[in-house]
Amino acid sequence: MSNLLKKKSWMISFVSVLTLSVVLTACGGSKEASGQKVTLTYWNGFTGPDRPAYEELVKQFNDKHPNIQITMDISPWDALLAKLPTSLASGQGPDIASFDSSLIPQYAKGNLILPVDDIYEKGIDQKVMAKSLVDAMKYNDKLYAVPANTATLLMYYNKDLFKAAGIAAPPTTWAEWQDAILKTTKTNGTDKQYGLVLADHATIPMWPILIWGNGGDILSTDRKKSMLNDSKTVEALKIWADLVANKGISPVNLTGGDADKIFASGKAAMEINGPWMAGGLNGVNYGVAPVPAGPAGKATLANAVAMVIGKNSKHKNEVYEFMKFWNSADAQAYLSSKSGFPPTRTDLNDNAQVKSNPLIPQFAAVANDSKFYLAGLEQFSKIDSDIFTPAIQAITNNKGTVEATMADASKKLDALLSGK
């Protein structure tokens, strides 16, 4: 058959399929609309103490949608991520999956998930979500996910250590913060009390918050150029690296788990952390407050778990119903009250269920001051593990000046971004 005939044959087949699709749609092609029961599979890693809250939310959806039933497959995140890409690529994957939003570029570039721009036009209102959260659901300016959950970071502080140091209220500015940190950093023989524990690897990103607070950044706005060598970035790192390396406000080379243990043991006055930390602080008289504002203003970190549609799902409309339900006001109020995480929406601070846990409105209140770390970048892992983290560890261990270290890191980052 000639190429022309092949082309005509393909076009005829395509038109026929398209026509059939239109007819089916007009006649109510969705199985839900026709009364047929649809079962959707949802893979996620919600194995923690908040698992019952997610299971109950799915049950609520199933009870309200007898023709759409969600079956959840819950496994540890590492096990999920080991099997998910292969399963999706082979056509055996789930209709719905959840994973950290930083992985969206990997799955979108691999054509393993479907774009969902239209759900934000049909049922999920972007205006009731923080812009940074919606942007974190994107890859190459297309939306590929809706949020399954989100979290912001606040400053935890030990009220007893504050009282002993004569600090009446949590600091609100960098000047107050640094003063409080130094007042609560003490050495008594081999016994050490730290003002602020700052993890530098295997952790939620804490150091970017300090950079943002001074007006610096890791990347330029268009994400094509390194900002690690920017004067505001370098200035911030000089201030905080000096406090760690030379004034001993925090141990060096801490993982996130290490930092948590020090604060939970009462050996640190402050830590930057998320809502999950509260459950491990039995016996600590603590409070939470926004991360103190730097010279450039308020800044904190946000993170999210994304909810996506597997590329081979035949039930996009039904998945959309589930996604809309999940991000509805009622569902988010319930999930927030039970999980301890702030809602994905910013319009629920006065909701009675949300306010039933006094910490949640405080985490929710900083959503619009929050940023995502390296969101939407395919090179996320390389930038973090090969460039940024080693640079932070170098300057906190006095293995080079901040200027020289960040200049070298900036060159590496620019080379990675340009594909060299």
Image: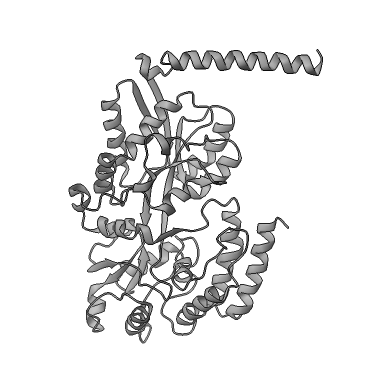
Which image quadrant is residue 155 in?
Answer: bottom left
Please, is residue 99 above or below residue 396 in the view?
A: above
How far across and down, in percent of the image, does residue 115 sit?
51, 36
Answer whether residue 241 is visible to the viewer in this image: yes
How far across and down, in percent of the image, does residue 163 sit?
22, 80
**Quadrant location of the N terminus?**
top right
- Residue drawn at x 41%, y 30% as measured from the top left: 319
Relative horizontal placement of residue 273, taking residue 140 as reference (left or right): left
Relative horizontal placement of residue 403, taking residue 369 as reference (left or right): right
| Front-most of residues 412 and 282 | 412
Identify the colour scheme used. one colour
Please, is residue 332 above or below residue 371 in the view?
A: above
- Residue drawn at x 29%, y 67% as measured from the top left: 289
How far across and down, in percent of the image, does residue 123 sit?
37, 35
Relative horizontal placement of residue 172, taking residue 381 as reference (left or right): left
- Residue drawn at x 42%, y 76% as measured from the top left: 295
- Residue drawn at x 49%, y 23% as measured from the top left: 314
